[in-house]
Each structure stands twice: as structure tokens, then as C-alpha cells.
Image (cartoon, rainbow, N blue to C red):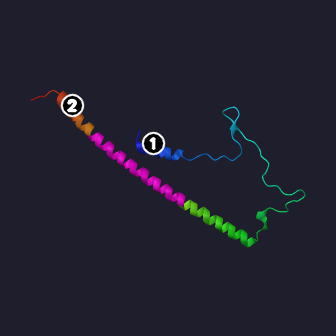
Amino acid sequence: MWACDREARQFCMQKKPIMAVTGDETAATGDMPTYQIRAPTTALPQGVVMAASPGSLHSPQQLAEEATRKRELRLMKNREAAKECRRRKKEYVKCLESRVAVLEVQNKKLIEELETLKDICSPKTD
């Protein structure tokens, strides 16, 4: 196994799975996490009802600006991800090229050894 293959696999394995449910993850049985539902930390005074969510109080212009900002953020993240992907690919290709060089040298040595052994073992006819 080559070091570049191992490093590439280790890099890919670094990404951690994202859990959608949060809470206390204490394992009761040792293998299955249990989740505990907690009451919200902030509560409205009794009798007070929220009429609308805070996100619905924006004007159409604010919504458009927010959408533009989110798009720009997404594009920026995508550019960075693409840049990192290109960097990793370049590193991988360099690793493969060095592997090819090592294998070519090894192959040449083996061919020379084979020729030497053929010369030693074959009967000489003069």
C-alpha cells in the first residue's frame, strides 16, 4: 500500500457525520444512544402569544437582499470547496507520478536481473 493512497483515505475519513437530533446522547444499552427532550430555556409570559415568526416581518426588499446575500455566501463557499478539490487532485496526481517513477525504476532493475539470470542459466554454445 502506498503512502499517498493511505493519506487520501485518511483525509476522506476525517469528515464527521452530522446528527440531526440533538440532546443527551447517553447510551442506556451501550450501543443505542438515547435522547432526552428538554423544555425550552426561554418561555413567554403566561397569556402572551407570538403573532408571527420573526422571519415574516421583513419587507420584500429585505427578503431579496437576504436571498442575494445567501446566494453570494453559497457561491463563495462553493468556490472555496472547488479550490480545495483542485488542490487535493493536484496532490493526488503528484503522488501517482512519483509512484510511477518508483515502479519504472523497480521494473528496470527486475528486467536487468532477469537478463543476468538468463545469461547465467542458459547453456553457452560456441
Q: Main secondary structure of the magenta part?
A: helix
Between residue 42 and residue 71, name the one nearer to us: 42
Q: Position of residue 67 (x, y in %)?
A: 68, 66
* Callouts 2 and 1 close, C-beta under 8 Å: no
When the figure is inspected, residue 70 is found, relative to residue 110, above or below; the finding is below
> How many numbered markers are drawn?
2
| Residue projecting furthest to the left | 126
Between 126 and 110, the one nearer to me in the picture: 110
Q: Label 2, on which residue?
A: 117
Does 114 appear in magenta?
no
The disc labelled 2 sits on which kind of residue? Leu
Expressed as whole percent of the image width and height from the top left, the position of residue 66 reads 69, 67
Disc 2: CA contacts within 10 A as few (<14), some (14-19) or many (>=20): few
**Amino acid at dot 1:** Arg
Q: Which mark is residue 6?
A: 1
Left or right of 126? Residue 41 is: right
Segment colored magenta: 80-108
